[in-house]
């Protein structure tokens, strides 16, 4: 059973109740974010990079530490292409199954893997790569409190075409195009589940969205625009 029709409803229900997460960019802004989870992958990520480069689009990748360790050359290729990097945990384990210590170690281990693969200073990675998307989008208020206490920024989504069940390139693309609006955060997957079609889906949606006047930006840019659009007195605690 596919749950794709439910995700827009889930988004509308959760977004106002968890305002410290990044669900979308600033209201009324044509900038959107194209994000990819579960990579890097030795077969799926490089063709995706070619599509992004062809259209001169910068995306955001939420990596699994274990995949970074296994495929450091692919991770380095993404980094050198100038894309934004976030954390998805060391393994694809739900954060609610981890103790606070295990969760922190999972994120730190992923940062260490990124530093080594991309030949970066570990301290720089710890300071700059701090966007976190929980696997399967599952979290609790306590998890958010822990993440923010450790200096991480929780990132969610607003457009979920459920590409990991492989509904077909045309179906996944149409779901994205029908749901995208100003400030949307689109999530696709370049890992073991859904990654087979990711380059083809990206090749369909990117030119169509550009033609509609959307601009692609990084998750970091959406954070910045949201902060600028939020009056100081209205900033979430």
Image (cartoon, helix red, strand yellow):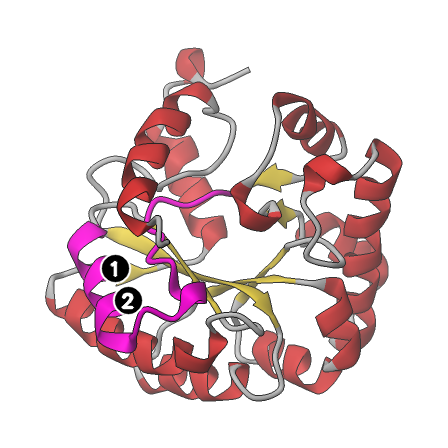
The mark found on residue 176 in the picture is 1
Number of on-image labels: 2
In the rendered structure, the answer to whether residue 214 lies left or right of residue 62 reads: left
* Depth order, front residue of 16/228: 16
Specify the segment rendered in magenta.
Answer: 155-180
Q: Is residue 116 magenta?
A: no
Which residue is outermost to the left? Answer: 212
Q: Position of residue 139 (x, y in %)?
A: 60, 34
Q: Quadrant of residue 92?
A: bottom right
The mark found on residue 172 in the picture is 2
Q: Residues within 10 Å of mark 2 (few under 14, many from 20)?
A: many
Instruction: Give the residue displayed 62% in from the left and 86% down from the top.
Output: 42
* Residue 107 appears in the figure: yes
> Vertical placement of 4 versus 171: above or below?
above
Element under disc 1: helix
Q: Residues within 10 Å of mark 1 (few under 14, many from 20)?
A: many
Instruction: Give the residue displayed 72% in from the left and 82% down from the top.
Output: 71
C-beta proximity under 8 Å, tags 1 and 2: yes
Q: Quadrant of residue 122?
A: bottom right
Q: CA distance from mark 1 to mark 2?
A: 6 Å
Instruction: Give the residue displayed 33% in from the left and 30% down from the top.
Output: 229
> Vertical placement of 120 versus 154: above or below?
below
């Amino acid at each position: 059973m596919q749950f794709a029709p439910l995700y827009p409803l889930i988004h509308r229900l959760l977004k106002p109740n968890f305002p410290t997460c990044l669900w979308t960019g600033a209201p009324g802004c044509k900038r959107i974010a194209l994000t990819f989870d579960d990579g890097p992958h030795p077969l799926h990520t490089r063709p995706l990079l070619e599509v992004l480069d062809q259209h001169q689009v910068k995306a955001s990748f939420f990596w699994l530490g274990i995949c970074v360790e296994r495929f450091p050359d692919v991770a380095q290729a993404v980094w050198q292409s100038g894309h934004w990097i976030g954390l998805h945990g060391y393994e694809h384990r739900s954060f609610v199954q981890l103790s606070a210590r295990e969760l922190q170690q999972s994120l730190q281990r992923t940062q260490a893997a990124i530093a080594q693969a991309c030949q970066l200073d570990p301290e720089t990675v710890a300071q700059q790569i701090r966007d976190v998307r929980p696997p399967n989008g599952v979290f609790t208020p306590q998890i958010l409190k822990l993440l923010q206490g450790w200096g991480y920024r929780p990132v969610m989504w607003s457009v979920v075409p459920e590409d990991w069940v492989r509904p077909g390139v045309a179906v996944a693309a149409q779901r994205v195009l029908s749901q995208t609006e100003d400030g949307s955060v689109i999530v696709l997957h370049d890992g073991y589940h859904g990654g087979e079609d990711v380059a083809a889906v990206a090749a369909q949606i990117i030119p169509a969205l550009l033609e509609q006047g959307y601009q692609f930006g990084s998750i970091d840019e959406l954070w910045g625009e949201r902060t600028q659009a939020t009056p100081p007195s209205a900033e979430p605690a």
